[in-house]
Image: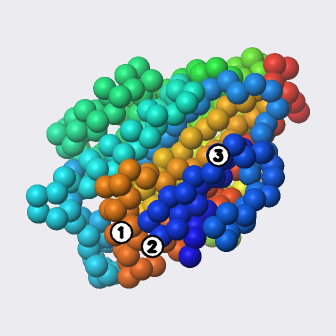
Amino acid sequence: MPEVTTVADDAAVVFVGAQARRYDDLEPDTDYTFDGVSFRTLPRPAGERLATVCTVNDVHFGETEAGVIEGADVGEVFRSEPGEEPYPEVMNRGAVAEMRALDPPVDAVVVKGDLTATGTRAEYQAFLDCYGPAFGTRLHHVWGNHDGYYGERFADAGRQQVDVPGARLAIVDTVIPRSATGGLSRDELDWLDDLGARSSADGVPVLVFGHHHPWSPDSATREPAYFGINPDDSDALVAVFVRRRSLLGYFAGHTHRNRVRRFSATGDVPWVEVACVKDFPGAWAEYRVFEGGVLQVFHRISTPDALAWSEKTRGMFGGAYPFYAFGEVSDRNFPIFPRFSTGAGENR
């Protein structure tokens, strides 16, 4: 069955099997039907397009098996064939090539953790060798739980502020060393709170990036060992978003799926998870920054060798993986509008 993967303000991509069909020169906020499937292009925020930001996550350099859950037998395990290039290198090379081909060029690339499979410096160097020459000073990255499992310390500089035309990027460190569960230190939260206050005063919207996703404060139960950011720290993170309306959204990896949640305390703020690079659907995300808002546009890596691997891994976990990982069109592509008047400080 045809799948709509990418929907932007001016283009869309429909997959028919393993064939990607791209449709360009579309009108914003308009209904279309191609290849028997219907969708509506994203509304284009007001004003000039100012910047482009790209993200990837869960790139897993050094991984050799896909579809493994420790202690469970959940279907076929997938590996690169003898003599083939390791699949993380295939997938990441494809993502890099597509991001480099953007027009206008990308202003910043943010890699949201799990740079490595087993937390070794050799795997980290493989990541740097792939992404560093391509993007130079435009590359920004933070570690994930896979990078912190085994006691090594790299890519753990923590909080980072990156300014691009029309927006500010805040990158936070959610890793608890030797743990899959994430957290946020008081220092990290205070830094984000201060950045949000300054950005509100400056009239600059902020996109917040981290590896782990938050626990939902609307949940009926609290799970101290939650797979994402623990409940107490998630509550504190949400409270910063409530106070600082310059913060437009939070963008994570970690779960290897596309999902958007919205919490009662923060209204239309998207709390986003983006699928991984390393296997199905094989993803990267583009953020188009306009004067009047931001668009998240999802991309499925479509270089031939990457697409062949991601199609093979569609069969992970007994064929159930796509139902978990792919998400709805609205989980992958959506507009984000300011919660305050840009250039006029906080709108309370």
Can residue 312 be seen at all in this image of the molecule?
Answer: yes
- Residue at mark 2 to residue at mark 1: CA–CA distance: 8 Å
What residue sits right under mark 2 in the picture? 321
Residue 92 image point, x, y percent? 34, 45
Mark 1: which secondary structure?
Answer: helix
Q: Which residue is mark 3?
A: 24
Q: Which of pointers 1 and 3 lies earlier in the amino acid sequence?
A: 3
Residue at the spot x=34%, y=51% of the render?
Answer: 91
The label nearer to you, 3 versus 2, is 3
Residue hosting label 1: 313
Q: Give the mark toward the camera: 2 or 1.
A: 1
Whether tag 1 and tag 3 are in contact, CB under 8 A, the answer is no
Comparing 264 with 279, the one in front is 279
Residue type indicated by callout 1 = Thr
- Above or below for 327 versus 102: below
Q: Amino acid at mark 3?
A: Asp
Counting from the top left corner in percent of width and height, residue 68 is at 29, 70
Among numbered discs 3 and 2, the one appearing first in the sequence: 3
Colouring rule applied to residues: rainbow
Residue visible at 22% across and 38% down in the picture: 126
Image position of 198 with respect to 34: above or below: above
Q: Are marks 2 and 1 in contact (CB under 8 Å)?
A: yes
Q: Secondary structure at mark 2?
A: helix
Q: Residues within 10 Å of mark 3 (few under 14, many from 20)?
A: few
Of callouts 2 and 1, which one flags the residue occurring earlier in the amino acid sequence? 1
